[in-house]
Image (spheres, helix red, strand yellow):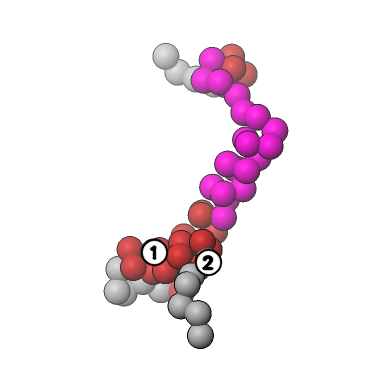
Amino acid sequence: MDKTLTPVKEEIASLLERLPANATIEDVQYHLYVIDKVHKGLESIERDGGLTHEQVEKKLGKWLVN
């Protein structure tokens, strides 16, 4: 059996090593969900581009507190 891990398996193994010993299934699910959302966000930025800090401030200016 090949013991080489894929990048996804490496990331999961790393997550499991970082979680405390008393982590629940729900803890694992939550962290996997967050990792997935971050990856999808980064892919979206790479594919579609993103906004600069100034563009975000302009769009959200009326809600930002100075």
Name the foreground residue: 60 vs 9: 9
Query: Which residue does the image show at 62% across and 35% down from the upper left?
Result: 45
The x and y percentages for residue 23 are 36, 71
Callout 1: 10 Å neighbours few (<14), some, many (20+)? few
Amino acid found under the numbered disc labelled 2: Thr
Q: Quadrant of the C terminus?
A: top left
Callout 2: 10 Å neighbours few (<14), some, many (20+)? few
Q: Which residues are magenta?
A: 36-54
Residue designated by label 1: 14
Name the foreground residue: 19 vs 63: 19
Instruction: Using the numbered discs, state the Cα–Cα distance from disc 2 to disc 1 in whole angstroms.
Output: 12 Å
Query: Is residue 62 at least partly visible in the picture?
Result: no
Name the foreground residue: 54 vs 8: 8
Query: Is residue 13 at least partly visible in the picture?
Result: yes
The x and y percentages for residue 63 are 54, 21
Amino acid found under the numbered disc labelled 1: Ser
- Sequence-wise, the earlier of marks 2 and 1 is 2
- The extreme bottom residue here reads 1
Residue designated by label 2: 6
